Image: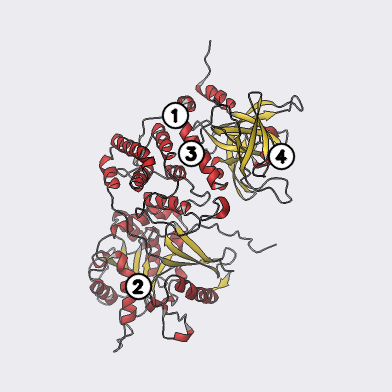
Amino acid sequence: MRRPSPLALLQEHLGTCRVRVHGASQGAGFFVAPGYVVTCAHVAGAQTGKRVPVFWKGTEFEGSVMTASAPPRGRELWPYPDLAVIQLLDAPADHPCVWLDSVPPSHGADLTAFGFSDIYEPGEASERSAALRRGGTTDALGGRMLELVGGEVNKGLSGGPVLNHGSGGVCAIVKATRLKNTAMGGVGIPVNALRLLDAQVYRALIRAHDAFHGCNDQWTRLSDRVVDNGSGGFAEGLGPVLNLTEERRLLAIFSQLPAEPMGEGLLPASRAGDEGESGGKPSGTKGHHAAFFAAAVEGARVPEDYPLLDHRDVFTELAAQMPPAAGQLPYELAFAADLVRRAATAGPACQGAVQDLRDLVLLTAGRLGVGEKVQQRLAQVPAPEAQASIIARIRHSMRDRRLYHVRVWRYRSASDIEPAAPESDALPLNQAVEHLAALLPEQIEIMGGATSPGLIELILPREVLDEGFADLSLWPQMHWFRLGHKQRVVVRPLERHETPALHAAWAKRWQQLDGKAVSEMVVCVCGRGDQHQAALDASFESDPTLAALALAGSPQSQPVSDAYQVAVAAGVPMMVWRRGSPACERGDGGRCGVPGRRACPGNGFFTELCATLSDTRRDDLPETIRQLRVDAQKPPRREGHLGDDIVLLWDDPRRQIPRSRLAPAQEGRP
């Protein structure tokens, strides 16, 4: 007799996790944790506290809607995420639960959706499963959904689970069919969208889910036969990776740790409010988790599509990142080590879980050959608090690149970034600069005042870099005040911030500057002769220490402009030049190095800059440049003073603004 395949056994087990829900409509749901059912809001209804019948194995149970997304406003389909959580008031003690997989399936991946159907017996719902595949992605109804193709998705599947054969976990919830009674498929809601519901309910649900699977391996024994659990090890050409068993054990321990901030001073604390918390009260928990994410993987953007509400969310988002370089700690393990350090001062109630976490981190690190690195991480001293700043961005309009949008944020840490004003309409450049100048005084006052030197970071396209931002006079009653004399004004390249593929090299070169004197690192670049773009690109590619440049002319003058573009793409985070200056011309007929490391007879700016910077370190450079601007105004005035028209590009990859979607080309049109 032929035995069922591992996949068939897992599908059969998932079928036992399925329930029928009779709420605002009739559909499916599934057990995610003991007593908790997930379904669609259009099935359960949007009214919190509403009692709904839930049927499992022919028995009716009474459930209560704990949280649900908002109903539609005059539209047939419910808006994103269209999810609800039901808690059974008297749940059966022996019911199974699915394993949630937060990583979206790859295109073409085999899927199975589970629910009910009355196609063959109208009015009599019977269990149904549908063999499907992952199609594309649909942006509709306010969110991003997975296209389910290759089979019929009838209305009785709504709210049901979608099994990813490749991961052995439930990756989505069925939302809607594309066309009734056809094999045109439908759409599913990623399980990560549960993080858009009430934060307290989500935490209770996801922690109960992880705790359940930490002591009940019924699902994982089946899924591990479908998916090769592996022993972990090394991704091809990259660093070590955890295996599935280690990941599940870590998540089970995380569920026992407090979700709120633990201990003080080990990571930057968020000052921002925590929108989405129950009752709308700020708690800082989201900022707390975002700080953990930022600490684990330098230079990566904190995820924005779904908020980080629990330790699990940080872990799964880190696991979805490209693995680090060989010899480095896996990001998830670095995060777990940070949790151990942070929890060391927590109350005695969770110390057992903290010790279990420490032991598991050390065992996993030992297996992966990174034991020494994790020991260093566990013993790490607290990182210094991030420097607060005002970050302003000027970027092109998608409709007309001659027009620009302006937006400003207050930055206090990677987890505490507040928008200061909505993005402006599309404006000509002179009006965009005027709009920015009108916004800055109030923001400077909020961040400490005009006479308390703060950091002003301007993210700009190349053609805007030479605008006289440092010379702006923002205070009419004190017309002698200049922005660059009172504040540390730096520029940053817009092109790099909008191209994620450039971020890895950028973070590495920034690290090269850590603790070193800038004068020892800076080299001269003019773009002439042997410094053509291909030669410069080869130099940057072969030498990661090339991280600070003195440009022998403005990035708007040729051939310096060509050299600047290569440097931005290569991730060079620090450049200095004189605003509006033409490209240097060597008068001695000599040839420049690639790039020029020695004193350049044709570029006095480079020579004077190296002498002036002396022992200045990376993080002190914005203040040094501010002082140079002030010194240039002291009598007796010297023409050509180094501080005259000096521009500093200082681009810290850890200091990134929230990523916003570009407006479509038809923006503003009816």
User: Going 32% across and 44% down the picture, which residue do you hit?
Assistant: 329
User: Considering the numbered disc 2 on the image, is that residue within a helix, a strand or a loop?
Assistant: strand
Q: Nearer the viewer, mark 1 or mark 2?
A: 1
Residue 139 in sight in this render: yes
> Identity of the amino acid at label 1?
Cys
Q: How is the image coloured?
A: secondary structure
The answer to which of marks 2 and 3 sits earlier in the sequence is 3
The answer to which of marks 3 and 1 sits earlier in the sequence is 3
> Around disc 4, counting alpha carbons within 10 Å, would you say few (fewer than 14), some (14 to 19), or many (20 or more)?
some
> Identity of the amino acid at label 4?
Ala
Snapshot quadrant of residue 486: bottom left
Most extreme residue toward the right is: 122
Q: Percent position (x, y) of residue 14? A: 56, 27
In this image, 411 relative to 519: left or right? right
Return the residue nearer the eye: 59 or 42: 59
The answer to which of marks 4 and 1 sits earlier in the sequence is 4
Q: Are marks 2 and 3 in contact (CB under 8 Å)?
A: no
User: Considering the numbered disc 3 on the image, is that residue within a helix, a strand or a loop?
Assistant: helix
Most extreme residue toward the bottom is: 636
Per the image, the residue denoted by label 3 is 207
* Gap in angstroms between the C-alphas marked 3 and 1: 13 Å
* Gap in angstroms between the C-alphas marked 4 and 1: 35 Å
> Identity of the amino acid at label 3?
Arg
> Around disc 3, counting alpha carbons within 10 Å, would you say few (fewer than 14), some (14 to 19), or many (20 or more)?
many
* Gap in angstroms between the C-alphas marked 1 and 2: 61 Å
Q: Percent position (x, y) of residue 580? A: 40, 77
User: Considering the numbered disc 4 on the image, is that residue within a helix, a strand or a loop?
Assistant: loop
User: Going 55% across and 57% down the picture, which residue do you hit?
Assistant: 661
Snapshot quadrant of residue 126: top right
Per the image, the residue denoted by label 2 is 577
Per the image, the residue denoted by label 4 is 24
